[in-house]
Image: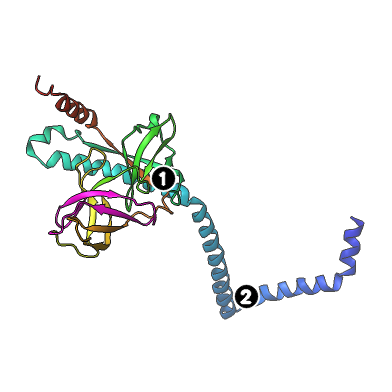
Amino acid sequence: MRSLFRLLIKNYPFLLFLVLEVISVVFIVNYNSFQRASFLNSSNAVTAGIYNSYSGVVQYFRLARVNAELSEENARLLNMLENYQNAFSDSIRIAHKQDSAFQYIPARVINNSVNKQQNYITLNKGRKDGIKPDQGIVSPNGIVGIVTNVSESYSMGLSVLNPRWSVSAKLQKSGFYGSLVWDGEDYQRAQLSEIPFHVNLQLGDTIVTSGYSSVFPEGILIGTIDAFDRPEGENYYTISVLLSADFKSITYVEVIGNNRIEELRTLKSETENGTAGN
């Protein structure tokens, strides 16, 4: 306490000067309209700047939660769209509005690789969330992969960047379809095969899922053609597809579950075993 008093006494002139300055400013602002308006405008600008900076910091730390909420909402809207399409595509099925073939489950990517010969993706959702093997994985920009292994709380799958897996894809413009496979080189590109020479191709043509598998619905974006060639002695194009999904920045995805996959498997098994119709 004594040290404080000694400090105040030692700096008395300077402290008195500051007090008088503050009193002078208060009188000037209170009794002069021009100075008062200028002071208020300046203080409002400073306050607004502080609030803007604070809001930016708060919003930055809320991005993860906002993205998660958007992913949940996107999955909900996709489910609603699927129900709508199933309900009204055929008047006979109007009585079965909830008989949706596909269900969308939002998930977050917790591990992903792009620089290996065989790349995998890990999600924070598992068996308890309705995830099962052989379900497709898509991002807002296009297909990502397929689920292969599931635990209670997590799931793992092959990404498109894995030569062990191929995707049934087609040209959106003409409907001709083939197989999309990654060659293990560029993480931004995959190769589309089995497209015959008589098909008219152009750079930038859109490639989408064909719908000929039980994994993905028809029409989900895969990418665009960025190069193609006609090899001598072959009957099919060599096509390079620029993938629409950026595999280095994927954070939130939807897992697509086919509600009729067991029925399709049973029918396939019966057909292959020659027991169909028995």
Q: Which residue is mark 1?
A: 118
Q: Position of residue 254 (x, y in %)?
A: 34, 43
Q: Nearer the viewer, residue 43 or 223?
A: 223
Q: Nearer the viewer, residue 183 or 177?
A: 183
Q: Which residue is mark 2?
A: 29
> Secondary structure beneath disc 1?
loop
| Amino acid type assigned to the residue bearing label 1 in the image | Gln
Q: Position of residue 19 (x, y in %)?
A: 76, 71
* Residue 3 part of the magenta-drawn span: no
Which stretch appears magenta? 169-198
**Whether residue 88 is situated above or below residue 23 in the rendered picture:** above
Q: Position of residue 167 (x, y in %)?
A: 27, 45
Left or right, residue 11 beside residue 240: right
Q: Position of residue 24 (x, y in %)?
A: 71, 76
Q: How is the image coloured?
A: rainbow
Quadrant in the picture for residue 28: bottom right
Q: Are marks 2 and 1 in contact (CB under 8 Å)?
A: no
Left or right, residue 1 beside residue 54: right
**Whether residue 270 is situated above or below residue 205 in the rendered picture:** above
Looking at the rendered image, the quarter that the N terminus falls into is bottom right
Residue appearing at x 55%, y 76% in the figure: 37
